[in-house]
Amino acid sequence: MSPLNMLRKMGNHIGAYKVHLCPEVKGQITDHGKPLANVKIERTLSFSDGKYFEDHTFTDEKGAFSLPEVNIRSGQPAVPFAKVFTSQAICFSYKNNEYILWGARLSGIKQSEAYVKKLGSLIGDISNDQTLFNFKSDKSGEYTNRANSICIWENDYRIMDVEKYLGLNSTKKIMARNL
C-alpha cells in the first residue's frame, strides 16, 4: 500500500464526527444461473466532505461474496443544515463488461435499515438489465430511496421509468448532446 493510501486510511479514523458509509454487504453473482467464481468485487464509498474509502473482495466457488461494514470520521465540523450524503458503488468486471451491483446515494450520516436489507442481499445475474429502482424509506415507508443495479428483489423493489424520472425534455437534450 502506498504511503498516501496509508495516510488516507488513518485519516478516516480522525475527524469531527462518525459517518456510516455502508453496512455489511453480502451477495452472489451468476451468469444465467451459473455461479461466477473468483470475480473481483470492487466497492467505492464516499462522503460529501471529500473523504472516500475503497476496498474489494473476490467471489467464492458459489459466486458468493461479502464486504464489511464501513464507518469513517468526517473531515469537517458538523454544520447545522449542511447537505451531507454518502455515495456507494459496488461493481465488477466479467469478460470485458462492467456490471453495477449497487449504485446509490444516501442523505445523512446514519445507517438506514432499508439500505441494510438491500445491501445484505445483492443477488445479481449478468443476464439481468441494469435498472434504476425505488425502495421504501425508513422514515415514511414511501418508495423514496433510489438505486441502480443488476440485482432484483422480490419485495420492496419498483423499477423506475427513466424517461419519466428525467423528464422527456431532459432525455431529448441528453440524446441531442450525444449526437
Image (cartoon, helix red, strand yellow):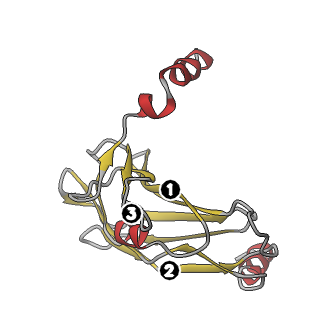
Residue occupying image coordinates x 70% and y 62%: 48
Q: Secondary structure at mark 3?
A: loop
Instruction: Say which of 62 and 73 sits in front.
Output: 73
Give how far across and how far down residue 89 sits, in percent: 52, 58
Q: Residue furthest left?
A: 33
Q: CA distance from mark 2 to mark 3?
A: 20 Å
| Three-letter code for the amino acid on which mark 1 is drawn | Ala
Percent x, y of residue 88: 54, 61
Between disc 3 and disc 1, whose residue precedes? 3
Q: Quadrant of residue 51?
A: bottom right
Tell me which residue sits at (29%, 53%) in the image.
157
Viewer-nearest residue: 39 or 49? 49
* Location of mark 2 (residue): 69
Query: Where is residue 119 drawn, in percent x and y?
Result: 39, 68
Disc assigned to residue 104: 1
What residue is disc 3 on? 39
Q: Secondary structure at mark 2?
A: loop
Q: Residue at x 43, y 28 (%)?
A: 163
Question: As displayed, is residue 95 above or below residue 171?
Answer: below
Whole-number angstrom distance, CA of label 3 to CA of label 1: 22 Å
Q: What amino acid type is highlighted by mark number 2?
A: Glu
